[in-house]
Amino acid sequence: VQTAIGVAHSKLILIGEHAVVHGQPAISLPFPLVGVEAIIDYVPGSVKIDSTFYHGPIDSAPDALNGLTSCIKATLEKLDMPCEDLLIRIKSSIPPGKGLGSSASVAIAVIRSLFTYAEEDYTMEQILELAAISERHAHGEPSGIDTLTISSECPIWYKKEEPFDLIEPHGDFHFIVADSGRMGDTRMAVESVSKLIKSAPKRIQSKLERIGELTHRARNALETASKHLLGQLLNEAQKELEALGVSDAGLNRLIYFARQEGALGAKLTGGGNGGCVIALAQNEMHSKQLCEKLKKIGAHAVWSFSLKKKPNQ
Ligand code: PMV
């Protein structure tokens, strides 16, 4: 093969972020409205990357790309391919640092493209194992939820060290995602929560457990078409995330505005302290209206998408 393409969509965490790092469950959703395409071409010489951030040989890539370059090298080794004669072009529509799993999507698109280039089939386990190399650089102590959701087409119920579960929503849920414009740093946010646990173990542990409990109830709400209940649970989770110090003024402004404009619930999504919010609209029409209003008050980007029950349900 002279050219090969690999793609990956992005992801959203509906509920359970941060608590999931400490053993609680989380629910995440594949987010197909933005994604990554990686294109491999045979080009003699060293392995080169062509992306918005960097263009050049992988061995001279900036430190920020260490995760990706280690992941590329490990994938080539797994495929028994020499580390040469490749140009890897990366095109992404995922805004980085916004809790949408940009780093994991890039890694997964690149891994898929390398397997396709080598004309090798891959399993989900292989992809997750290789993508974890990249995520450890990006996040420090990633729970694994990002890579899993990016490799899945269905909402995921995830708990560390346990087999994951697919969730089948009953009923239609209309969500809005709005970008606060500020880049978050998931690694720092995760570390700040770990520090809090050390300083006040009982108090913080109970908050994480509370998020876990809300996440269990949110699964039930998704599976029983309970929109209003799901909205309330998202709001409750936001309260706990604020208490953990991972929400900021930009996120709070969008969250409170969305609620004031009739959203059934709204919270941050992903690492927080920058990044995006997710809001649950009343219906499809309300979702479109809310998008327009959020744009008007300064959201950098807004997406509306639906989780729909399968036609045979
Ligand atoms: O990559 P982000 O910013 O979407 O956040 C990942 C979610 C966290 O729970 C904060 C971290 C993790 O590894 O699960």
Image (cartoon, grey):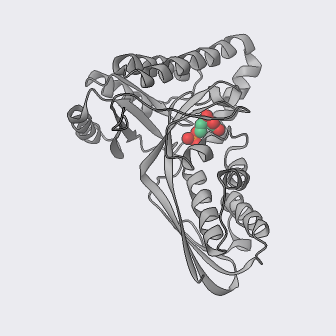
Residue at x 26%, y 35% (from the top left corner) = 287
Where residue 313 sits: x, y (%)? Answer: 36, 31
Where residue 18 sits: x, y (%)? Answer: 62, 29
| Residue farthest along the front direction in this orientation | 312
Report if residue 255 is visible in the image.
yes
* Left or right of 191 in this view: 282: left
Where residue 117 sits: x, y (%)? Answer: 62, 75
171 is higher (above) or lower (below) than 187: above
Where residue 229 sits: x, y (%)? Answer: 39, 16
47 is higher (above) or lower (below) than 75: below
Nearer to me, 75 or 182:
75
Residue at x 41%, y 40% (from the top left corner) = 180
301 is higher (above) or lower (below) than 40: above
In the rendered image, the quadrant that contains the N terminus is bottom right
Quadrant housing residue 289: top left
145 is higher (above) or lower (below) than 243: below
Residue at x 68%, y 54% (from the top left corner) = 131
Q: How many marks?
A: 0
Nearer to me, 114 or 234:
114
| Residue farthest along the bottom direction in this orientation | 44
